[in-house]
Amino acid sequence: MQFLNPAAFYLLGFIPIVVALHFLKLRRHTHRVPSIMLWLSTDEDRRANVPFQRLRNLLLLMLQVLFLSLVTFSAARPALHRPGVMPGRAILIVDNSASMLSTEMGQTRLALAKQAALQHIEQVSAEGGMMLMLTNTTAVQVAFTTDTAKLQHAIENIPKSEAPRNLQPVFDAVTHYAESPQDQVFFISDNFENLPDISLPIHKIGVGGAAENIGIVHFSVEIVADKYEVLVGIRNFTDTPRELDVQLAVEGEPFDQKTAAIPPGKTKSILFSDDPSGLVGKVMSAHLQLDDDFVVDNSAFAFLSAVSPLRILLVSDNQKSLLPALLRTYGKHVQLRLVSPADYHGIADAHIAIFDGGTRTGRAAFGGFSEVASGTHLVFINPGSNLPFIPEDARDVEEVAAPLHVIKTDKTHPLMVGVSIQGLQVLESTSRKMPLSGRSLIETEKGALIWIGQESSSQFLVFEFDAFNLDISFFALTVPDGQLFFYHCLEWFEARSTPLQSFAFQEGQTRHAFRAGERVRIAPIGEEIVLHVQKPDDKMVKGVDSIFTETDQVGVYTLFADDRQLEQFTVNLMDPKESALPHPGTAPTAEVPTAIESELQPMTQEVWRIPALFACVVLLLEWWFYHRDGLSFRVGVLSKRTA
């Protein structure tokens, strides 16, 4: 400890003066009176009722001296030094993803993370302040500040989330907010695998230990062959075989139950199937009847929806095309309307419109194409130069008569999952400059052979060759990749024709069933209509720009347009990485990382308020003792006179 104002100790020189004044007595004047008998009796009563009379004057002196000493000590500005200030700024990231809700010894990992964060801000301060961020949002919880109380309040109110963590956007934001190489990141989490690579040092503070969990990793609900089929995939993340009951519920009421025996580290599928009468449109849910350390993945929800028709318009007069037969094999729910280019008068209410330019009259139909209804998706086959929706410079095409081979595919796009068309030969095609909105899926030596683009709320897929004409290529007969690719395209467009749409394509996804943390696109409904979504906890959230992002709870959500209920959808975790409950492998710790201990600079913390507070308390005690004597004396005299 040191004193920032040591000159204040000169005030201690007043202590002898206080002592001297205390022992100085006032000179009493002598007066003649007839008798002092009444005064003597009164004084004797007062002295008899006040214990430790001899010490009372000394106690007052001690309190006065102590008061002066404390005031002097406070005026000297005592300060403590500790290594806790780091140069630059600090960014504190707290993991609030689903796995942080795992319970250990009666506390969740999130509660342990909050304790670690509170302890950290007490140990470390930054010259430029500290910022608080969370893993499941890019919003800054607290901007750079040195106000410890503000940081503490924000940490104590960190919300829980049942969504998997998404680190890349958060760490991208961290890079944006950092100003110098001295800035440092402190990450409190139960899992440090696959951290994004950033230029700033990341100091890891681990929480959580080994936990046991059995969870639902797959859940699908559909009607197949006049029966409902509920498939529940359950994974045992423990090291021992487990047996448990799986309950199927309808609208929250028990409906069926089966027993599953699951080996350690394995996944087992349980199928419920029966007559769907009276169940269409209702919420079907699966529940694991067990107690483990993680309850978020013990339930899953989905709606049993009737198969909605998929309306497809095919504008073609190409007699050599295999496309009509391929469309009919996609599913019984396909409603195919085939018209010739001469009879084409608009798309009407079609979900998907396909224009086959395999003939001259087919290509001529593109010239009469003007606009498309909102939400209708398009497929153009061998369009030539008459392709709408793209800039003029992208309409200049080159006819390629020489045989070409597929040399590259975009394996990262969802439409290309499991598709391999490498080496496919095409005898005739066209080549064009790609528009800015386009993304090449399959390429040859001359450029994009199949690409996808976006126009307003509609997407369009372009084949730069007659893909379903066997005289041009064997794309349609490439088993299974040709058919699989086209089925992916139909499923992609079908998913984007529903009122609620996913941004991420998932093959075989149950209608209106999303994963926690997934964004939901709401199809355009109309102008001046206010959209609200009711979450499982009954909280109402306003939809912004027809996109709903707060899918951070497992359960059933309801979409409202103004006060009218439109749709319902469900959200489930379905993330084996989160359900595995990873942990750092060490005991919970919030100590200052060793890597920065040498970088911490001494921090001066003044503590003058503490002695000042004690001085006020001593002053009040001295006042009370002093005035109690005078009060008791006056009360005694008054009582004698009354008697």
Image: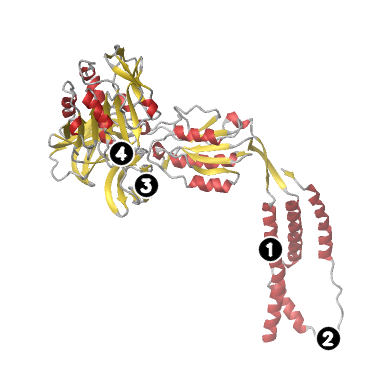
Residue type at mark 4 is Gln
Q: Residue furthest top?
A: 402
**Residue found at x 22% / y 26%:** 362
Q: Earlier in the sequence, mark 1 or mark 4?
A: 4
Numbered label attached to residue 376: none
Where 629 falls versus 172 (above or below)? below
The nearer-to-camera label among 1 and 3 is 3
Residue type at mark 1 is Leu
Q: Are marks 1 and 3 in contact (CB under 8 Å)?
A: no
Q: Earlier in the sequence, mark 1 or mark 2?
A: 2
State the image coordinates of residue 298 (x, y, percent, origin top left).
30, 39
Numbered label attached to residue 33: 2
Numbered label attached to residue 501: 4
Numbered label attached to residue 621: 1
**Residue found at x 27% / y 27%:** 380
State the image coordinates of residue 83 (x, y, percent, origin top left).
65, 36
- Identify the residue under disc 3: 543
